[in-house]
Image (cartoon, rainbow, N blue to C red):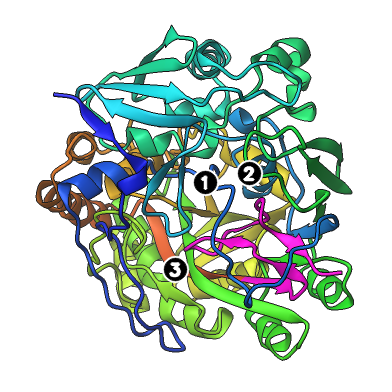
């Protein structure tokens, strides 16, 4: 039986994820609502660890009522870190993903609520079986270099992901995708290795942004500096540590952008970003501190928006190294950290403490008991592990996120209270990522600040902790391997029945928590601030910002 996807009649559905009703200061009050029909699960499920990069080119206005848009202008965005790569198959960081989002498109896209799957470079699709998907492609589309967008271009992109080059994004497809076939010029067929309920949504992620095959062949290793997509903006320039510029694509197949260009500038210092916004030197910034948030809310020229974020935060531990190969030590580290105090005193209540590996955004989320703050218990476990005198560890961090240093100093003090000496090693973001992307069997990293988002529990487990997902080709940085939980997760990703999926997901989380593979900390709110001159921006359910075709600037 062939199941056809008709995007025009897909209705929003709440699916196996938390819905935030209210949030008291201090992160105390949350309620969860989980509900999903079988059709909704098939239409909305998502792949873990992916930036939802392919998004609608137009959306309803989020600003005040109707004013005639003005064409032109340069929207300036402040980023906490510089771009690392403009090749989406090798861009695993947030700043690079934001830049790529202006240049590239995927076969599918998700709406601002993260619920509906919509057409993009594919106009429709059919689920032919539990492992075969056929997509009809949009006709008349060209890459920015004039190359035709067609089935051959799509096949070239996914063949590159599965081929010998093994770019960073290949980790999203190697476990699942078997082959890509160009049926005709505008029809593509995908065959997966195993049943995978999240495949259509996977095609909306950053690893699925389609490159020009002509440009990839022409520039080779330099393609990351010469990006070519099909998006509403095309590449202007990228001056490392200075600016990235995307200019309007007047040949775009969809609605043309009002803006002349979008500029992204790195501002590593949070205070500098706020000063620039208030001075009118930039139009948008994220990664602002709670203290700065209160100041900006009193500024009549600025809009401040806070939403439950899409990326949780934890402390990773390399379980292939002593003493982290001992579960008692890992559990002790969890008991040693007062998460509620972090939420209240460092993040001013703009976060929620996590008790386990998953977060409220993920399909199948279940709130486990976790490790309540108990330093006495931490000392007891360390003594049982033969470490009554404590030990010394390196604690790696970066300058990427607000409050990172303050968070690491807080962790350092709390670990000291149970006899563990943590030496903070804060690195520039690119160097930090380079360390984390090493195979854990050869990595010098011991303990580190980590964080990522995920859309469903089973995928998230496999990509973050699974036996077959070690870095650099996967997302497993800490060297963990639990075959029993892997088996459950591999079973779950092929299930489209809500009740069955949620039951297995609950078991996964109950078994994962006592492994203490990480010190699970919190899910912080995404706090963004924009100039009130920015009209009709696209803001996602997790606080992501994009200037889409309808976005314009007041003079």
| Coordinates of residue 313 in the picture (x, y in percent) | 48, 61
Q: CA distance from mark 2 to mark 1?
A: 7 Å
Q: Is residue 317 left or right of residue 212?
A: left
Relative to 100, is 269 above or below?
A: below
> What residue is rendered at 19% in x and 25% in y?
2
Q: CA distance from mark 2 to mark 3?
A: 23 Å
Q: Quadrant of the N terminus?
A: top left
Q: Quadrant of the C terminus?
A: bottom right
Magenta region? 528-555
Relative to 125, is 540 above or below?
A: below
Given residues 104 and 410, the one toward you in this image is 104
Q: How many marks?
A: 3
> What residue is rendered at 52% in x and 46% in y?
51
- In the rendered image, is residue 338 in sight? no
Residue tagged 1: 51
Relative to 462, is 127 above or below?
A: above
Q: Is residue 293 left or right of residue 242?
A: left
Given residues 50 and 3, the one toward you in this image is 3
Mark 2 surroundings: few (<14), some (14-19) or many (≥20) residues within 10 A: many
Secondary structure category for the residue under label 2:
helix
> What residue is rendered at 62% in x and 76% in y?
65
Q: Nearer the viewer, mark 3 or mark 1?
A: 1
Residue tagged 3: 522
Residue 550: in magenta span = yes
Q: CA distance from mark 3 to mark 1?
A: 19 Å
């Amino acid at each position: 039986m062939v199941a056809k996807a008709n995007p025009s009649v897909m209705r929003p559905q709440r699916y196996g994820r938390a819905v935030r009703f209210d949030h008291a200061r201090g992160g105390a009050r949350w309620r969860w609502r989980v509900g999903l029909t079988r059709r909704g699960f098939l239409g909305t499920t998502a792949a873990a660890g992916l930036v939802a990069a392919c998004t609608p080119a137009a959306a309803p206005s989020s600003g005040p009522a109707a004013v005639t848009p003005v064409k032109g202008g340069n929207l300036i965005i402040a980023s906490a870190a510089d771009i690392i790569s403009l090749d989406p198959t090798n861009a695993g960081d947030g700043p690079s993903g934001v830049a790529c989002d202006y240049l590239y498109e995927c076969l599918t896209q998700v709406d601002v609520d993260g619920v509906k799957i919509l057409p993009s470079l594919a106009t429709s699709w059919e689920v032919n079986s539990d492992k075969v998907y056929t997509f009809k492609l949009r006709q008349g589309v060209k890459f920015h270099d004039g190359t035709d967008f067609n089935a051959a271009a799509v096949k070239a992109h996914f063949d590159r992901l599965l081929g010998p080059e093994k770019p960073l994004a290949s980790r999203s497809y190697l476990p699942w995708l078997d082959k890509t076939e160009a049926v005709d010029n505008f029809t593509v067929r995908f065959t997966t290795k195993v049943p995978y309920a999240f495949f259509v949504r996977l095609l909306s992620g950053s690893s699925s942004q389609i490159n020009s095959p002509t440009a990839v062949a022409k520039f080779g290793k330099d393609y990351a500096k010469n990006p070519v997509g099909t998006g509403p903006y095309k590449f202007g320039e990228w001056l490392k540590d200075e600016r990235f510029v995307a200019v309007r694509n007047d040949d775009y197949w969809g609605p043309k952008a009002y803006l002349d260009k979008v500029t992204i500038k790195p501002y590593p210092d949070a205070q500098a970003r706020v000063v620039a916004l208030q001075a009118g030197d930039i139009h948008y910034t994220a990664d602002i501190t709670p203290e700065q948030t209160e100041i900006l809310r009193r500024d009549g020229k600025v809009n401040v928006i806070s939403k439950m974020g899409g990326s949780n935060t934890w402390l990773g531990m390399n379980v292939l190294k002593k003493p982290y190969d001992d579960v008692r030590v890992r559990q002790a580290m969890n008991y040693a950290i007062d998460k509620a105090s972090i939420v209240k005193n460092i993040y001013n209540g703009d976060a929620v403490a996590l008790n386990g590996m998953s977060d409220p955004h993920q399909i199948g989320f279940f709130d486990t008991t976790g490790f309540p703050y108990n330093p006495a218990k931490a000392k007891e476990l360390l003594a049982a592990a033969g470490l009554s005198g404590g030990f010394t560890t390196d604690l790696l961090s970066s300058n990427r996120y607000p409050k990172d240093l303050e968070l690491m100093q807080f962790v350092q003090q709390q670990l000291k209270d149970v006899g563990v000496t943590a030496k903070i090693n804060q690195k520039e973001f690119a160097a930090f990522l380079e360390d984390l992307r090493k195979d854990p069997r050869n990595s010098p990293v011991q303990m580190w600040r980590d964080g990522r988002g995920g859309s469903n529990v089973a995928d998230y487990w496999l990509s973050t902790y699974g036996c077959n997902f070690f870095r650099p080709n996967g997302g497993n940085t800490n060297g963990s391997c639990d075959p029993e939980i892997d088996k459950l997760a591999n079973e779950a990703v092929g299930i489209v029945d809500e009740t069955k999926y949620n039951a297995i997901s609950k078991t996964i989380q109950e078994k994962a928590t006592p492994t203490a593979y990480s010190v699970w900390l919190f899910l912080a709110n995404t706090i963004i601030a924009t100039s009130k001159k920015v009209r009709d921006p696209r803001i996602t359910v997790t606080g992501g910002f994009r200037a889409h075709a309808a976005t314009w600037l007041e003079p």
